[in-house]
Image: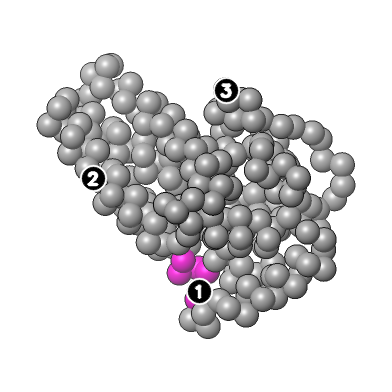
Amino acid sequence: MNFNAMENYRAKYRSEVGKYYNGWVHMLSVVIVGIASLSYFIYQINEPTVTEWLTLPIAILCVNFAEYAAHRWLGHIHTKIGSLFYSRHTGDHHSFFVEDYMPYQSVRDWRVVLFPTYLIFAFLIGLILPMGAVLYFTFSANVAFLMATGGIFGYLFYEVMHFSYHLPNGSFVEKVPVWRELRQLHNLHHRRSIMVKENFNITLPIFDFLLGTLYWEKPNKKES
């Protein structure tokens, strides 16, 4: 996709965003629900054993894999079950942002950066709640709430990191070691020729490394 095609798509996408959409409301609704849920889960944890504590890193690792798997096999492969996600991700996000043209330009552009607000509720109700119930009755309350803590932390971590990769040029992210390299990995993923093959992790590239889909090269031109 060339620059003119991208600009034409951006104009079309923006014209179809509802007039009542507010990026701040979108972001704050996710942050409030996420932080409130995280605080509640942490408050419920009561003197966990060393073994129970292992639930937390395992949960975070599972979210990292889910991030990778959903992105690779649903976000970039058209399937019946993932058709809406594919349309929003490959169709919208990768047409709106291409390599070296990554920053959003207005608060209304946040609609194509952040997950829809309803998704955090679907994540909590459809995944965290049933898994937590199983772990609660199978193992312990601590295991259940540590899993929930790791799960919602992973979700928020994804949103924060992905949003940071689309900040305007000159943002603090460009100056922070490791963070700027993670940003570059995502920038490379938005190269049309490799977007279906490499750099599917958004947060930490754990499964890109393990599954051989990690690709790196130094930035060679200024984003605009």
Question: Which residue bears the numbered disc 1?
Answer: 22
Residue highlighted by disc 3: 210
- Amino acid type indicated by mark 1: Asn
Q: Position of residue 65 (x, y in %)?
A: 47, 33
Residue beneath label 2, please? 129
In the rendered image, the vertical position of residue 49 relative to residue 74, given as above or below: above
Cα separation between marks 2 and 1 = 29 Å
Categorize mark 3 by other alpha carbons within 10 Å: few (<14), some (14-19), many (20+). Answer: few
* Front of the two marks 3 and 1: 3
Q: Quick one: 83 or 51, which is closer to the camera? A: 83
Label 2 close to label 1 by CB (< 8 Å): no
Q: Residue at x 32, y 38 (%)?
A: 149
Q: Residue furthest bottom?
A: 19
The label nearer to you, 3 versus 2, is 3
Counting from the top left corner in percent of width and height, residue 19 is at 53, 83
Which quadrant holds the C terminus?
A: bottom right
**SS state under label 2:** helix
Q: Is residue 131 left or right of residue 164?
A: left
The type of residue carrying mark 2 is Leu
